Amino acid sequence: MCHDDKDVIMKSIEATASCSKDHTMRGCLRLPHVVLALSGVAFHGGALAVNGALPGGNGTKNASMGGASIALPLDAVAAANNPAGMAFVPSSTTFGLQVFRGQSSADYVLPGNHLENSQTELAPEGGLVWQLDNGFTVGISIAGAGAGSDYGQPALPVPGAGTAKTTLRVAEFIPTMAWKPTPELALGVGLTLAYQQFEADGVIVPAPVPGGLLPLPSHGRQSAAGVGLRAGVLWKPTAEWSFGANLKSRVRMSGLDGYEQDLLAYSDGRLDVPAQYGVGVAWQPTERLTLAADWLRILWGEIKAMQDPNGFAWKNQPVLRFGASWLLDERWTLRAGYSHNRSQIDSSRTVQNLLVPSIHEQAYTAGLSWRVDPRSELNLGYELNPRTTLTGTGASAGTSLTSKVQMLLLGYHYKF
């Protein structure tokens, strides 16, 4: 951001303070585009925001392998990764918990305007799968996504501005049916039944006064629901090799009451869940070692909310995921992985993404499993998204975002 733009913002803040005293909004001028960008205060924040607003992986075991999962179903959460994978999971149930710890900071717009955010969030996951006759499998997986930031103060010293904070939670219930036409090949289809909660406060936009800024009112916590489709295929031509592909349609969510009036006016108050597709491969060169890799593409740019010319402008995001597991003995298994993506946020949009510090491009994971008995297993995992900084360019020059994310993964798997 250039020096002149910062002077304009300072004058805008002073003008807003003056206007708030005499309660008049007549005879106004529009603010420059760099200030208009403030209307993009985010609906996604740090919580779970690893690949955009999505977790690095679904299922404790697969998440501990960098998220690699499309060709490697390991538990009853498999439908969240590839519906066809349920056909290769024994009748069982899985319970999991992802404990998110996010820390972020921002040097935002004005010199010396430093913001800090620190949050701990919990996201449950799980599933059930039943193997039926004639090669059919039915089940349901439960996965979570979302975000949340709370900077504990207004983003800018604008009179009447609320605390810059936002919360987005998305729960996905995925009823699935898979079929094996042959022992080596599985086809799967499922629904994505999504439930969403959203709340935002501290949004600041240009005001209809000469050079003013206007805090938007918070509409409180609102909810929405939507339905989408999933499909997948998994082929195991040999005992050592597996190949998979998956497809998830965009989930068109219902409107969030109140937000269609201002913050989400461009998308009619809707925050859709993005479509995605990917392919994966798994190789077991020995009885003890398994290697897996995925390529995934998340279509953030196809969501209308991301197409707002004054908004976030997230781009479609490719993700590479690699993982390995090592069977120590009949009871213990070790896992490790690595994930790399291409950031969905352009540096020129740093200002708009204040409450979206989802700027990580790398993740390192590790985990272990302990087979308690032939039917039950305890799983533990850890994910580190190292400290990363996004420095604004163009209209966002002078603003920077820094974020670090850690996740503790807990799971329990029980075979019927």
Image (cartoon, rainbow, N blue to C red):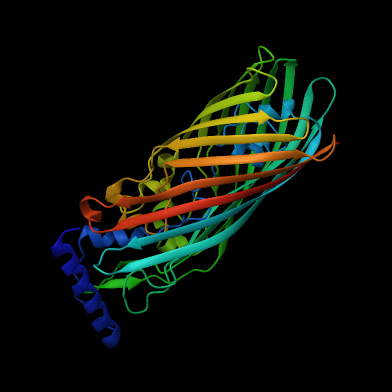
- Indicate the quadrant where residue 1 lies: bottom left
Specify the quadrant that holds the C terminus: top right
Q: Nearer the viewer, residue 286 or 30?
A: 286
| Relative to 271, 212 lies left or right | left
**Nearest to the observer: residue 32 or residue 286:** 286
Q: Position of residue 350 (x, y in %)?
A: 31, 53
Asked whether 416 or 34 is in front, the reply is 416
Q: Residue at x 61, y 50 (%)?
A: 408
Q: Residue furthest front?
A: 328
Q: Is residue 121 left or right of residue 387?
A: right
Q: Nearer the viewer, residue 232 or 399?
A: 399
| Number of numbered discs on residues | 0
Q: Residue at x 49, y 68 (%)?
A: 219
Above/below status of 281 relative to 305? above
Whether residue 90 can be seen here = yes
- Taking the spot 22% from the left edge, 69% from the top edge, the residue there is 9
Residue extending furthest left?
A: 4
With respect to residue 393, does 341 lie above or below? above
The reply to whether residue 255 is in sight is: no
Q: Position of residue 218 (x, y in %)?
A: 46, 70
